[in-house]
Image (tube, rainbow, N blue to C red):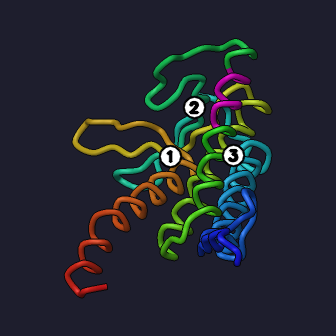
Amino acid sequence: MNDTPAPETSDAPTNWFWADQAKPALWAAVLTLVIDQAHKLWMLFGWGIKEGERHALLPFLDIVYVKNTGISYSLLDGQSQSWQLTLAGFAILAAGGMWIWAVRGQHSKIMIISLGLIVGGAIANAIDRVWLGGVADFFSAHAFGFYWYVFNLADVAIVAGVTGLLYDSFIASRNDAANGA
């Protein structure tokens, strides 16, 4: 008689870096990265915008080239190459953590795509730090004399990804609980 318990089975993926469920995250990350980098290349070399140059686009939106050498809102600003590489490394580590989160769990499609948007945006901004010595930002939202931060398409993807995570965590899970799922 065999007294050895049967191994427990789990639906969680066994691979740390890939699972079929991660395909939407990969697509979201790659599309975010390609669109953001193509836009930045076009702005810098196609349009030829210079740092600090401002162009009115809409009554509430200007195009301006600002190189952010810090983190959000230029906090922890630092011009040195070693600081930019440190921030780029941190972004890659954060993107790696988000990727593993997407691969290792059983998540909704919204969460998977949201994680992919964050991964793609983080990597795109990390590339800027290595290539340009800071993150290239181009869009300046303003109204009634107030100017908010200048941002880029990678930032839009990151914010959309965080919004998707919040929606999935609070709204979708509450709806699932209410529906008995």
**Residue 135 location in percent, x, y?**
63, 34
Residue underneath mark 3: 123
Q: Residue at x 60, y 71 (%)?
A: 8
Report crowding for label 1: few under 14, some 14 to 19, many 20 or more residues within 10 A (C-alpha).
many
Specify the amino acid type for callout 1. Phe
The spot of residue 122 in percent (x, y) is 62, 45
Query: Do callouts 2 and 1 mark residues in contact (Cβ within 8 Å)?
Result: no
Q: Nearer the viewer, residue 46 or 156?
A: 156
Q: Earlier in the sequence, mark 2 or mark 1?
A: 2
For residue 50, what is the image quadrant? top right
Q: Residue 78 location, x and y as percent?
A: 60, 14
Amino acid at dot 2: Val
Q: How many marks?
A: 3
Residue type pointed to by label 3: Ile
Task: From the image, tell me which residue sits under label 2.
Answer: 66
Q: Residue at x 67, y 16 (%)?
A: 83
- Cα separation, mark 2 vs mark 3, equals 19 Å
* 88 relative position to 10: left or right: right
* Residue 174 highlighted magenta (yes or no): no
Above or below residue 22? Residue 115 is above
Residue at numbered disc 1: 139
